[in-house]
Amino acid sequence: MTAKLFASAVTHPTTTEITASYDGWQDALQCASQCCSRDELVAIIDSARRHQIAATGDIIAACSGRSALLTAWELSDARSDSGVETLVRLRLRKLKLRFSIQHQIGRWRVDFLIGNCLVVEIDGFAYHSDVEAFARDREKDRYLQERGYTVLRFTYWDVMHHWRSCEEQILGFVRANRHRSQPRQ
């Protein structure tokens, strides 16, 4: 049975015959390689790796022969918890900052640790929208601040629509050397 296409649907010449209401991951990845930026492709591959959509070898094989996908694969890292974290990782890398991702500090894992004590947290709405998550984030911030860490929190909206402002805030802390002092453990 062929799925019905809506007038606003976008098809690609490489798309196989439509036989289901969704694409398989290989077709979706191939279509994404024609529409998405390099950083978006990295985020897609990161998510596929993180959520184990397919075996690593299968993802590599799907990227084979497609330079945009191979480049994205080489830049991918399964440790990002979300696509927006992947975008931040790639953007921090462009700034040539020394950072680690998913860094453990005491009982808390932080999204990014820049230098020795600048923590950057990326708060997507799905995981930070309820009362418990809000309270847990404040507890985490207090724990980190008591030990000398500076915490900067950015939302999905900040990263996607106001990255320049986020970048300026991060670089402001880095330039003031507030990322280098040694926190207490």
Image (cartoon, helix red, strand yellow):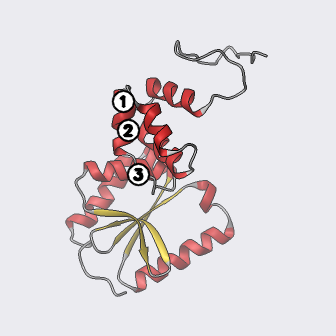
Q: What residue would you read off at disc 2?
A: 72
Q: Secondary structure at mark 2?
A: helix
First-in-chain label (2 vs 3): 2
> In this picture, is 3 found above or below 62?
above
Q: Residue at the location (46% across, 55% down)? A: 80
Checking the image for residue 68, the label placed there is 1
Horizontal side of 126 relative to 168 (left or right) equals right
Q: Give 31 or 163, whichever is nearer the viewer.
A: 31
How busy is the neighbourhood of tag 3: few (under 14 within 10 Å), some, or many (20 plus)? some
Give the alpha-carbon distance from disc 2 to disc 1, as whole Å: 6 Å
Checking the image for residue 17, the label placed there is none
> In this picture, is 17 found above or below 104?
above
Q: Residue at the location (49% across, 26% down)? A: 30
> Three-letter amino acid code at disc 1?
Ala
- Disc 2 + disc 3, Cβ < 8 Å: no
From the image, which quarter does the C terminus lie in? bottom left
> In this picture, is 54 found above or below 124?
above
Where is residue 27, by image quadrant? top right
Pinpoint residue 33: horizontal percent, then vertical percent. Answer: 44, 27
> Three-letter amino acid code at disc 2?
Ala
From the image, which quarter does the N terminus lie in? top right
> Three-letter amino acid code at disc 3?
Asp
Pinpoint residue 39: horizontal percent, then vertical percent. Answer: 39, 39
Q: Residue at the location (31% across, 53% down)? A: 92
- Disc 2 + disc 1, Cβ < 8 Å: yes
Q: What residue would you read off at disc 3?
A: 77
